[in-house]
Amino acid sequence: MAVNTDTGILIAQHTQGPHSVQCLLRPDKANRHGLITGATGTGKTITLQTLAEGFSQLGVPVFLADIKGDLTGISQPGALTDKLGKLLHERGFDAPAFQAYPVTLWDVFGEQGHPVRATVSDLGPLLLARMLKLNETQEGVLQLVFKIADDDGLLLLDMKDLRAMCQHVGDNAASYTTAYGNISAASIGAIQRGLMQVQTQGGDQFFGEPMLNIADFMQTDTRCGSTASGGGLGVINILAADKLMNAPRLYATFLLWLLSELFESLPEVGDLDKPKLVFFFDEAHLLFADAPKVLIERIELVVRLVRSKGVGVFFVTQNPLDIPDAVLAQLGNRVQHALRAFTPRDQKAVKAAADTMRANPGLDVATAITELGVGEALVSLLDEKGRPTPTERVFVLPPSSQIGPISAAQRQALMACSMVAGVYEKTVERASAFEALKGRTQARMAPADMPTDQAPALRGTAATVPAAPERGMLDGLGDLLGGGTRRTRASAGEQLLKSAASSIGREVGRQIIRGVLGSIFGGGRR
């Protein structure tokens, strides 16, 4: 694959006929985001793999979700098979320079990659309410639960913390009504049922500590080679999502949380020569399906503003109608694979896709969409002035890495030599809402004739988090978009100490933001 920091990533071309066409994605326009669409089996995965390789060669880290389990082949060099050789001959392509790319494997369940976790408090009530399928009233009660936890200095870190907090609020609803509003037992029950359902799907493994340090996504590595400028190849972070897709709301919520983490954690950098990270959001229709208007507005805001943080977001889905117009307008780079016009909705999708791509006088875009073969696409990318180029009918270049999944042994070898090996594998348990509420209950139930030398120790188990130091308004603005202060790279022990300290320090900021403005996704830091 031809990659140049000035001209861009060559992702597709057409060399036959009187005119040859090359489609290059400019690195300085990658943070204008993009869209990859097409029916099942038309070549979207190969396009995604080719793009990921190109960004890696530029030294740009990549995050992508492996829905079907076949993108891990990026970690191994490809080979010239008979099928590939025939395809290259038919399309007039040269054989790629086969190579492997640095890969870090991740898995919410910790089975096929390093565990990925977030705290309940960091996720926030808005995203959590969507994951639990709560209605507006139930979501309001969940927000009150978070508010009460903040006011009482109780940390919500994992699932048992939130369950204990909901039970506590439900049991003492009458005492909270005057200060916080009506809290119905039915709403508390709905929240608890939703939490139980998420837990049975394995979602409770996502909540807890150590929490993901977003800086671990933004690595380069020289072990698989180096870029033209001499730096390391961008690490391709692959999330094992085949099992996660059994809980589609958890999948969509998790990726949206990651995107908001990137927005909150990274500084403003404006337009760069190349992005700091490229984020591929596969099966993007799950993000917007049945999403309330307020959530779609938040997503639009993050997509629009994360560009200034140097992050490029590429949505991958079957149908362009899956993306709301407000978000679709932010996606400047387009790769359209074949769509089949079998139904009226399909015909509408074809027309919508054609209307959103720049016209080419020599190409009937609407007709071509239905005629494209596997690996063929209509491509319109941004030029040096940020204008969409005329749509071209081209063939996507084959990747230089292995097409298809790796073996279990290769997967284990990748995890063992990973840059983050051993950092996230062991969970951390520290005093939080569950322990504090349990201690309070034990203290109340302590016998009246308990020896005085034992009572203080028992009362100590009910201690809550110490009072948080005050923060300035500017310090609280980071919470508006999903969190608090930024984290830097640290050892596992340092991360634990910093996590404990920062959890206390952010309590006041979380109260201000949730109470007055509400964060962008209703969350705050731990």
Image: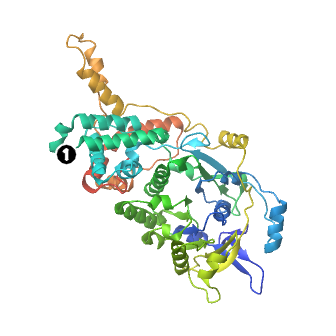
Query: Which residue: 25% across, 54% down?
Result: 516
Name the quarter where the C terminus is drawn.
Answer: top left
Kind of residue at badge 1: Asn
Image position of 427 (left or right of 15) = left
Please tell me how crowded label 1 is: few (under 14), some (14-19), or many (20+) other residues with Cα within 10 Å. Answer: few
Query: Which residue: 50% across, 46% down?
Result: 213
Image position of 369 (left or right of 266) = right
Task: State whether residue 464 appears in this view.
Answer: yes
Q: Which x, y percent locates residue 411?
A: 68, 43
According to the picture, the residue beneath numbered tag 1 turns out to be 182
Residue situated in front as seen by the camera: 228 or 301: 301
Query: Which residue: 38% across, 43% down?
Result: 194
Q: Which x, y percent locates residue 8?
A: 65, 71
Query: Which residue: 29% across, 49% down?
Result: 138
Dividing the picture into quadrants, the one containing residue 419 is top right
Dividing the picture into quadrants, the one containing residue 120 is top left
Task: State whether residue 469 appears in this view.
Answer: no
Q: In the structure shown, which secondary structural element does the residue marked by tag 1 occupy? A: loop
